[in-house]
Amino acid sequence: MGTEHSSTSGLWAGVDVGTQSLRVLLVDDHGVVVGRGAGRLDSHRSGPVHEQDPEQWWQVLGRAGRAALTSAERVHPRPAGLVRGLAICGTSGTFLLAGAGAAPARPLTPALMYDDARAADGWTGPGQPSWPPAKLAWLAGHGSAPVRAGLATGRVRLEHCPDFLASRLVGHPVAADWSHALKTGYDPAALAWPAASAVPAGVLPEVVRPGTLLGRIDADGAAHTGFAAGTPVRAGMTDGCAAQIAAGALIPGSWNAVLGTTLVLKGVTEHRLEDPAGAVYSHRHPDRGWLPGGASSVGAGLLDLRFPAADRSRRDTAAAGFEPAGGIVYPLAGRGERFPFVRPDAEAFEIGDFVDDNDRYAAVLQAVAYVEKLAYAHMRRLGARVGGPYYITGGATRSRYWCQLRADILGHELILPASAEPAFGMAVLAAAGDGPLVTAADRMIRPGTVVTPRPGATARFADAYAGFLDALVERDWIDAALAGYAKDVPLVGASGGAA
């Protein structure tokens, strides 16, 4: 918790529902974090299926909300009365089906998570196989009898994670924000659901701009969380967009890379990027312009799987002796890749001669940075400005060595924001409300720490990066033209433009 005391008359609450935990932050008008609360979430995986229990989200929100208010009492007596707004972010593409009705309904399905791949085989419809349209089609054919009947008649309601929690807080169904609705098929350019959707009317929610007032916490929501009845609940954004807000990457040319279990890259462009391969999707900026991005399946997840009991700091120290590593890996913890290319059949691979597990550990760290560098090249090839600034957020930033390694391989300085959590981004969005998001961000976001590439380090990894790209070409995961472009185009000073 921040130690700086504040004289603000208002506080803003941000809620982040992640894969492994739910977090609540209370932030004042000047960006000082005055209260924190968190709780663990369980995920259930079985083959391609990945689910969470929505009721656990609600229970953990109650405990985490009260914990945040209790910790804020050190700075502000009776902080619940000072909270002027609350916004929620969730994992992009996570949804559930609930019964239709005027009041919050009981979930009819578990939450189908963002990377749930049960619908991957044979999917030829819009979007990626892990996105909601594919899984809605799967549920229409394989769900329980009530789910199948409800989808056929329009008597069920699709709710993204924040929709579910917001409806519980305010006591009635709420609109979705256009950020969470994107992967469900919402057209952010037309600001409408597609007219030719196979989903019956009534299943899909109304959609609003992030920051829009959804309702106010009712008596039951207040009793459960400790927040005051009447507290405004505003539409949020996805966790990747929330981290982007927290970083301050909100003007064209700026980017934020979120590295945790997986890697998410998001930036800002004046115009919407069109990616024929479908790896890049663009959220609509709450102010103006677009937020292009993509979510890779690589990240720290493979470290958790391959080195479950590792002392990360000791491994980092040992990994510094393998620059570059003795071989190349593609660091997937499961099957399928979504960005910077789409290959549902992709699986982790390992080539080369490794000295030991420290060498392999180093290869994983480097490979994630190679994917990140390829992602920037892909964005530039589509026409985006990628000159920076580059912000980095996510749990992996706790490893200072990995941050340095990423700066070295990218050949670009990286900025660690002062408050990088997605929940902080949601507090900023709640503060902005219907007004300009950039204005609230300028007021609340403080300068971060800069990580500068070490002299000569980028060149030291050049051959290994080229070999990594060649390995992807050999597997037909990317084409030779993209690989050649990624090898030849430096990121520093790159202003965008198609190859």
Image (cartoon, rainbow, N blue to C red):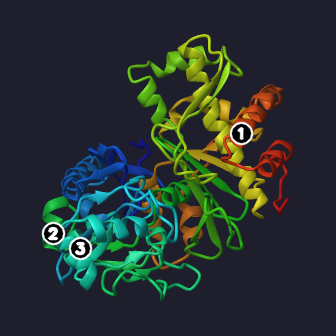
Badge 3 amino acid:
Arg
Q: Residue at x 47, y 78 (%)?
A: 209
Q: Position of residue 461 (x, y in %)?
A: 77, 28
The residue that label 2 is drawn on is 106
Q: Residue at x 68, y 42 (%)?
A: 414
Badge 1 amino acid:
Glu
The circle drawn on residue 148 is: 3
The residue that label 1 is drawn on is 474
CA separation in Å, label 3 and label 1: 42 Å
CA separation in Å, label 2 and label 3: 16 Å
Residue 270 falls left or right of residue 39: right
Q: Is residue 389 visible?
A: no
**First of labels 3, 1 by sequence position:** 3
Q: Secondary structure at mark 1?
A: helix
Q: Is residue 485 above or below residue 426?
A: above
Q: Secondary structure at mark 3?
A: helix
